[in-house]
Structures are given as structure tokens and as C-alpha cells.
Amino acid sequence: MNILVIGGGGREHAIIQKLKEDPRAEKIYALPGNAGMAADAECHPIAATDIPAIVSFAKDHAIDLAVVAPDDPLVLGAVDALSGAGILCFGPRKNAAAIEGSKVFAKNLMKQYGIPTAAYETFSELDKALAYVETCPLPTVVKADGLALGKGVLICETREAAREAVRSMMEGRIFGDSGANVVIEEFLTGPEVSVLSFTDGETLVPMVSSMDHKRALDGDKGLNTGGMGTVAPNPFYTPEVAERCMREIFLPTIRAMKAEGRPFRGCLYFGLMLTPEGPKVIEYNCRFGDPETQVVLPLLEGSLLDIMLAVAKGTLADTPVTFSGKNACCVILASNGYPQHYEKGFPMTLPETGENERIYIAGAACKDGQLVTNGGRVLGAVAVADALPDAITAAYALADRIHFDNAYCRRDIGQRALTALGGNA
């Protein structure tokens, strides 16, 4: 089979390596990919948002399955365009991708169908939003309506901070048109859990849970990032919590989308907060999370290709989906200064990896035949082990064998999970 993976980060590298395990995956293309994944896929410099060029490429290369991984092309309608050209796709159509593309849509969907989430108000006028922050409970959360690279959420401890957040989004447009509308919502407390799920619009199969680490610095300090590391499974996500989430959140969401005429096929990501009142939805994503994918897919048993084909064809109910029961840890190596200003172009030295190790490359280019850094999040060092402490230790041991100037990483990935398990650092 000829397979096309759209995107160019660590998530896409993880998807490509997992697809490669199936002998039917004869040829894998990545648009645009990056130099670090060139050993696993044939990369072509077509932007993930250049939908006409993607469709043309897919037709010219007789693509049997296209996997649209990032949020931007999904929200822009890449699956609609590819499907219209007769290409089988893994990923939701544009009207279903709105579950991530518009936080206002997502919040209103949850309210209408009784899916537990934070109390909220939505605003399209600056003066009304500013008036609301003078009386809302503190702390409060201000969210840009549209896509903002995972950074369009500001937690505000004071009214002054809330006013500044609203002004920066709606007036200053720090997130562009994504901030034309804002959601101001209740601040929830409790452990956070990420749950990716396969769904064909009728059947939903959750993947193993994970725990992300969003802040740039140890101790959950510093700026929000796209994610500095992950562990799976998440020890806070017990079988009892999982059963409740399936009953109160997962299945109601799929049924709500179908009822709205927006059946969701692909990977639906549930960002959850386990509050004292029970699990609530913080956010939906219309695709695999990054770097959650980097710890979830190494634990998947069997063929990812089989599952993706079943999702695309609507036969997920007849397809087994199983996970190994082991633990995984991903440590992100980033360029110092990320998520703000950082230098790139530093040569990278990568070690050979063992059976239970993976290196998923997110930001790399090739210069004079040498792999060099080319992004804020450069790569993920991943290890799998029977026990979580061993997976964490092995992931850091792998990270320490990787070298490039200006590298930094958090040194406490997985520590909250170990505490939950009764372990220690």
C-alpha cells in the first residue's frame, strides 16, 4: 500500500514508525515531514495546509490511505478535499474538526448534550468580555476560540491579568483571528488526564491514558508549551474513572456529533480534569496529541494500519485494539529559549536505539549532509518498560545519549505519576 502522512513533527514520526511495522506499508510519504524522519518516510516539501497540492500529490502517487495528523489541515477541510478526490482518509471532515477548531462550538455542544465541563461564558465583543471579568470567580481561564498551537489558554489569578488576557486576544490579536471570540470559564482543579480514542463515528475505542507536562520548566513553572514530556498510562485514570468517562463523556460526545450531522471519524482526543465532582472535559482535540502519541503508540499491539483502515471504512467494531500493559515515558529535548526565542542549526548526534527505545524527531533539517536542529521542540526520547520508574529512568538515559548544542529538557517528567503510585523520584 502507498500511505501518505500529512504533518512534520514528532507525532507524525511516531505514526509513521508504527505504520511501518505492517508489511503492507510498502511506501510511506510525509508532507512535509522533516529531515529526521527521512529514513522512515519519503518527505516532500509540501506544507500541511496546502490542500490543493496535497490532493494533487495523493492522486499522482496512487495513495491508498491518507493520514491527516495536524489540526490546521483538518480544520481547513483536508479530509473533505482528499475524500472528494477518491482518497481513503484517516481523520475527521471539516465540520467534525470544529470540535477543536472552535472552543465556542465545543463548549456549546457539551452544554446542549449534558457533557460535564467547566462553567463558561462566550464573548465576541470586547466590552462585554471585560465587564464579565469584573465579577467572575477567580482564578479564571481565558481561551481563544480558534487554533493557537496549544498556547491559546491563559490562567488568570487576578482581574488585572484577566483583563490583560482578554485585551491581548480580542484587541491585540496575539493569536490572530483565533482570538476574535473568547471563552471565559471556571478554573477546575484536580489531576489532568489525556485520553486519545479511535472512533469511526459509531464505535469508540479509548487508547491507553497519558499524562502531559505542558510547562517549560521543572516543577510546572515557566510558560506553556506544546508539551515537554509524557508518561503512559496515567495512574490517576483508574478503571472506575475510565468506566465513568466512557458513560458520561466519550459515548455522549460521539452521539452528540452524530446527532449534529457531524459524525467524527479519526482520533478524538479528550483532555480531562478529574475534579472532586468527577471527570470533566477541559478540551477536545480532533487528532492525535503531541507528545501523547509518542508514548501511546509504542504500547499499541498489532497493526495501526488495520485500525486506521477500519476507522476510515466504518468497521472499527470488528477490529481488535489492544495495548501491552507496559509503561512508556517521553522526554522532549528542546532548544533553549523555547517556547519563545531560540537558535537553531546546531548539529545533532543520535545514538543507536535498543528494542525498547524510540527517538521521534520533530524539528530537524539537513545541512551539508548533517542533521541539525530546526525547531523549538527538537525530538522526543522514548522508553518502554514493565514498570513506570524503569521507563522514566530509561527515557532519561536515552536523552542523555543525544547531543546538540543549546539543548534543554525538564528533569521531572513522570514525577507526579510516581507520587500517585506511591513511588519516589
Image (spheres, rainbow, N blue to C red):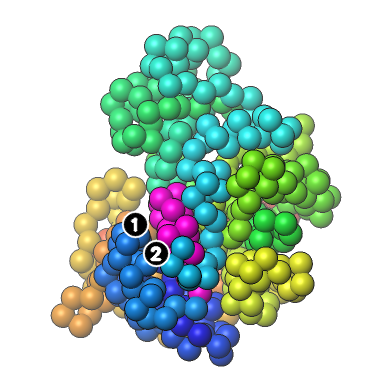
Secondary structure state at the residue bearing disc 2? strand
Residue at 81% across, 55% down: 239
* Residue at the spot of label 1: 49
Tell which of 256 and 213 is nearer to you.
Answer: 256
Residue at 20% across, 66% down: 345
In the rendered structure, the answer to whether residue 318 lies left or right of residue 123 reads right
Q: Amino acid at mark 1?
A: Thr
Q: Main SS type for the magenta part? A: helix
Is residue 320 among the parts visible in the rendering? Answer: yes
Q: Earlier along the polypeptide chain: callout 1 or callout 2?
A: 2
Q: Badge 1: few (under 14), some or many (20 or more) residues near its Cα, within 10 Å?
A: many
* Residue 295 position by quadrant: bottom right
Residue range of the region highlighted in magenta in the rendering: 65-83
Residue at 54% across, 65% down: 90
Q: Amino acid at mark 2?
A: Gly
- Which quarter of the figure is the C terminus placed in? bottom right
Residue at 43% across, 21% down: 124
Q: Nearer the viewer, mark 1 or mark 2?
A: 1
* Residue at the spot of label 2: 7
